[in-house]
Amino acid sequence: MILPNNFEQKIGFTQLREMLEGLCLSALGRQFVAKMSFQPKADQLQKLLLQTDEFRQLLSSGADFPSQHYHDVHPHLVRANIPGSYLDVAAFFAVKMSLRTIREALTFFTHAEENLYPTLRLLGIGVQVDRNLLAALDKVVDDEGQVRENASPLLSQIRQELINRQGQLRKQIAGILRHARQEGWVPEGAEPTIRGGRLVLPVIAEHKRRVKGLIHDESATGQTVFIEPEAVFELNNDIKDLENAYQRELIRILTQLTAQLRPHIPDLRKAYQYLGLLDFIRAKGRLAQRLEASLPELHPRPLIRWKQVRHPLLYLTFQEHAKDDPREVVPLDIELTPEQRILLISGPNAGGKSVSMKTVGLVQYMLQCGLLIPAGDGSEAGVFEDVFLDIGDEQSLENDLSTYSSHLLNMKQFVTLANKRSLILIDEFGTGTEPSLGGAIAEAVLEQLNRARAFGVITTHYTNLKNYAERTEGIVNGAMRYDPDQLQPLYRLEIGKPGSSFAIEIARKIGLPKQLVERATQLVGKDKIRYDRLLEGLEKEKTELEQRTAEAAKQERRMKKAAQEYQDLKRYLDDTTLDVLREAKAKAKMLLKDTNQQIEATIQEIRLGQAEKERTKEARGKLDTFVREKLQIEPPKARATRELADANSLKPGDKVALIGQEGHGEIMSVKGKTAEVSFGGMKTLVKVGQLEKLTRSEIREREKASARKAPAQYSGFDTTGKMSNFSPTLDLRGERAEDALNKIMAYVDDAVMLGVPEIKILHGRGNGVLRQVVRDYLHRTRAIASVADEHADRGGDGATIAVLK
């Protein structure tokens, strides 16, 4: 049982029914939408839901299912059932194309995999479309809705003769028209036209006597008359006779075809019932797609265990205005079980209480009408026999009823009819009369509904009802979440605690005079204020805990991501190391092989020369050349001793070098134990203890050595340009670990090649992954002398300073 009679309008289901009608392809489907009703039987409901879910899957799969020519031909079948009657060409075209659609649908489910659409497949059992009937229809009417030329031999002959006569007529009347134009008897641009089914010429009224023939009509102004020339009388008569003969033959064919159709009418009625049902289920599937709805696990007993359920109409409205209004529907988690049957929702006005209650009513009604519901995966639903709704102002002047009286009449019906398979939906329970009396009556009604073991969702502001729910088994409090600092609703339902109306706080926020707010606080009493403040405090703690939990979850996700990146990088480095080792081993093996061959050749040559001094010297020279070419080894040279730099002796202009480095630079300034040195036009700060002074001879030797190496090592390489574009600082902040590693490898190679004494890498602090990657690589690189944090004033451990050897 559904109460009240206008339940669908009050709950919003009327709009969903209208949407379904719009999604249907024909009147056949719309008839099923109009008959759609609440289904209280679990087995029948399961079948309806499975049909909808299977069609939703079919639509989502993109399968080639027929979606055209869903024609309602029932009026044609009624006419065809009368003996001696015949259907016109348009009716046969509709019958033919829709029967083809039915046949294609049956074929689709027959050829589909057996486990794909089992419920939809069962719908076609007993539905027949006679192949011979379809062939007979196709023989007469083509796919464009026109009569085929070869529908019968006589029809084809008449049609050909008609075409010949019409050609002769056009040719003859064209000649008459040319002559009339030359004489000026017809208006400018005049062409032959049809009047009374005969081809005529438009002639200027004052020249009508000059053209012999029959006047059929004249224009509205009387300035033009339409004359059938005497010369084409016979041709027009022949054409008219042929047209009549063609029509008689066509009627004979249509009458014969209608007689052939008539015995199949009972089967056709069943087939079109099937087509309408497919159209209806297809519309339900398309609505499910729009709502992103799904099929919950269905139980035969009353139960609601929905996850992330959304109000369907709100969801569609927000989707429609998504570009202008980015808001989204806040989903609800709702659970009504035999142990927790009645949910009492409280909270501030405009906080979402009524929407939550309507969501339960509308979604449950949708479900029991065979529609999928907009709920998340893992949702469960049950079946109710009754749904009772009390909402809105039902004041009636005709029946002399006040708003509260109408509420009491509803309560009377509810407590009389409610049972353990009923769902009760009440908005603003107990309002409309004196609060203490209204609250008392509401509590008594609630007690009776609970005793009847009914299920329900009830919204209220009354404290006595919240207290009753708190201490009564079977009833649970629910609160619409509210931001107590901003005094704004969050539209989230929390089950397990009552909500505050925040009336005093809202009055204070909107600027009600302070003395009025304070007076209201005194009048309401300390206990009530303490109760509301306790709820407010709990709300704040809940909000803070949620924020901290969200932040902790966010940090955990970051750590997991960082750990994954680190693992990926480690795996990449391990794989790269193995590849390099394999390649090095292969090269070493080849080099060792070549070296052994060369040594053996040298020994053989010395033996053959019987240790002659010149030949032995020549053979050793070849061996030395081979070693230098293969291993690129230069004989060690004696290195001159250098004077270690001293802070007191250094002055601007002195030439210095980094200990262990081949390049050299010039002192720009000295401050304490730190010197500013220019290396190749790039200034950098270096500790004096890392420098050594160079003599003029050493500087000349370095310059000569650099000149010798440049052509061989840096052929085609612009060292000056590279140095001018080189920055001593590399910024890796925001990079992924793998990209950062590639960049720092290339950067260190450039720094070593250019003789840069010190580099700085910015990696930030973050979660420490980049810093670890950078320093692991620098520690493994032989060209790096030391690695340390930057000074605390210039970034600290967010940057790494590396000194090159």
Image (cartoon, rainbow, N blue to C red):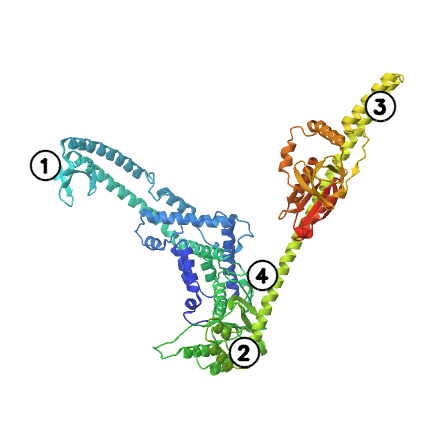
The residue tagged 2 is 529
- Cα distance in 3D space between marks 2 and 1: 107 Å
First-in-chain label (2 vs 1): 1
The answer to the question of whether label 1 and label 3 lie on touching residues, with beta carbons closer than 8 A, is no
**In this figure, what is the number of numbered marks?**
4
Is 671 situated left or right of 471 in this image?
right
Choose mark 3 or mark 4, whichever is in front: 3
First-in-chain label (1 vs 4): 1
Amino acid, disc 4: Gly
> Can you give x and y, in whole percent of width and height, for residue 663 in the image?
72, 35
The residue tagged 1 is 209
Decide which of 536, 208 is in the foreground and name it: 536
The residue tagged 3 is 600
- Cα distance in 3D space between marks 2 and 4: 41 Å
Amino acid, disc 2: Ile
Choose mark 2 or mark 1, whichever is in front: 2
- Cα distance in 3D space between marks 1 and 3: 129 Å
First-in-chain label (3 vs 4): 4
> Can you give x and y, in whole percent of width and height, for residue 785 in the image?
75, 42
- Cα distance in 3D space between marks 3 and 4: 79 Å
Give SS at disc 1: helix
